[in-house]
Image: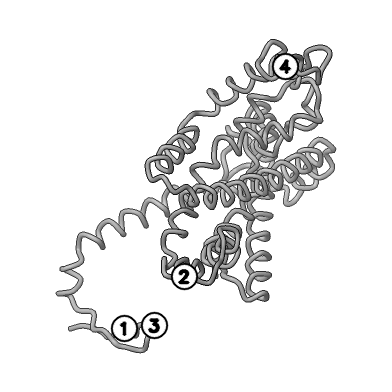
């Protein structure tokens, strides 16, 4: 026995035990990933209950005192938390714009390289930093931007500075440094998907444009950009939800007491109060706030894309 299932184009296919048996390997692995997702992604959401309790580890979730939204009120009455929201949003937006735009520009420029060997070499070199840990990346930045680093040496040699500058002692330099670190580390890796989208564009379009006398800029403007526009929109919508995931490692490793007012993010706040101070309820409340805002941003961005007639997630 089997049952009929209607496909998107209106055709009907019959699902039988024979078909299930034929696809048993795929179904098995699909079940494995579903179980994995339930256990490690959905079951832990039960821990959100801590945000509504005066949670005590020795009492556990079931016996801790229920306090409603008191922890959330405590969060938003804390000036430090308001400051870390500002820092997180600012760095998240800066990182989103910088890494997103640079990945698109880099992919388009790399696509214009005519030498196949040169293109592969540049692409390989560009995405290698993605595999470096933030410990190594921040170490390189510390060495380069230190008082005796190469950046200060160049600025002194060209007469831009009269004496070495400690970049990590001035809050105004911190956000640009974080943005630069993210761009340097992720641009090559993020460009891969755009390069893939560019290669799927029909070459006949470029040939027709060349016959009509179009130059490289005209081809990029009228063929390449429209061709990768759906990919750009989908990735933009996905990345909008990550605005509050501005980072933890780079801010934690590069931050210090002098730039604390601009370096702390929500994740660092959660570490400081939720774990270091054993106030798990506050940490959980901050995490819930970040998750809810991310969901709202994705839904709003998706609705705006829908109204504009662009590609959307759902």
Left or right side of 262 for 275: left
Q: Are marks 4 and 1 in contact (CB under 8 Å)?
A: no
Residue in front for this viewpoint, 128 or 276: 128
User: Neighbour class for label 3 at 10 Å: few (<14), some, many (≥20)?
Assistant: few
The picture places residue 35, in percent across and down from the top left corner, at 36, 54
Closer mark to the observer between disc 2 and disc 3 = 2
Secondary structure, mark 2, is helix
Seen at 60% across and 31% down, the residue is 249
Residue in front for this viewpoint, 174 or 244: 174
Closer mark to the observer between disc 4 and disc 3 = 4
The disc, 4 or 2, on the residue closer to the chain's N-terminal end is 4
Residue in front for this viewpoint, 242 or 128: 128
Quarter of the rendering occupied by the N terminus: bottom left
Q: CA distance from mark 3 to mark 1?
A: 10 Å
Closer mark to the observer between disc 4 and disc 2 = 2
Above-or-below relation of 211 to 112: below
Query: Which numbered marker is on residue 8?
Result: 3
User: Neighbour class for label 2 at 10 Å: few (<14), some, many (≥20)?
Assistant: some
Secondary structure, mark 4, is helix
Above-or-below relation of 76 to 133: below
Q: CA distance from mark 1 to mark 2?
A: 39 Å
Residue designated by label 1: 5
The picture places residue 128, in percent across and down from the top left corner, at 45, 34
Query: Which numbered marker is on residue 152?
Result: 4
**Residue 82 lies in what quarter of the image?**
top right
The disc, 1 or 2, on the residue closer to the chain's N-terminal end is 1
Quarter of the rendering occupied by the C terminus: bottom right
């Amino acid at each position: 026995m089997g049952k009929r299932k209607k496909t998107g184009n209106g055709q009907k296919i019959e699902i039988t035990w024979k078909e299930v048996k034929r696809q048993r390997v795929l179904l098995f692995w699909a079940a494995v990933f579903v179980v994995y997702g339930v256990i490690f992604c959905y079951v832990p959401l039960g821990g959100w209950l801590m945000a509504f309790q005066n949670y005590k580890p020795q009492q556990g979730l079931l016996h801790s005192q229920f306090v409603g939204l008191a922890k959330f009120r405590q969060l938003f009455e804390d000036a430090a938390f308001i400051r870390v929201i500002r820092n997180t949003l600012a760095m998240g937006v800066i990182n989103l714009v910088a890494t997103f735009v640079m990945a698109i520009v880099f992919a388009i420029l790399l696509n214009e390289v005519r030498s196949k060997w040169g293109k592969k070499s540049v692409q390989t070199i560009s995405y290698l930093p993605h595999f470096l840990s933030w410990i190594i990346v921040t170490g390189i930045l510390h060495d380069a931007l230190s008082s005796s680093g190469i950046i200060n040496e160049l600025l002194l040699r060209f007469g831009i500075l009269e004496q070495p500058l400690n970049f990590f002692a001035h809050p105004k330099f911190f956000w640009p440094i974080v943005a630069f670190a993210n761009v340097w580390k992720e641009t090559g890796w993020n460009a891969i998907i755009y390069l893939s989208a560019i290669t799927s564009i029909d070459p006949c379009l470029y040939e027709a444009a060349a016959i009509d006398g179009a130059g490289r800029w005209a081809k990029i403007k009228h063929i390449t950009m429209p061709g990768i526009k759906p990919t750009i929109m989908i990735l933009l919508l996905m990345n909008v939800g990550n605005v509050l995931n501005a980072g933890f490692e780079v801010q934690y490793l590069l931050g210090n007491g002098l730039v604390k007012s601009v370096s702390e993010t929500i994740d660092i706040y959660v570490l400081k109060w939720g774990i270091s101070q054993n106030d798990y309820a506050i940490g959980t409340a901050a995490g819930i706030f970040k998750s809810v805002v991310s969901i709202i941003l994705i839904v709003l961005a998706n609705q705006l894309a829908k109204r504009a007639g662009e590609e959307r997630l759902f």
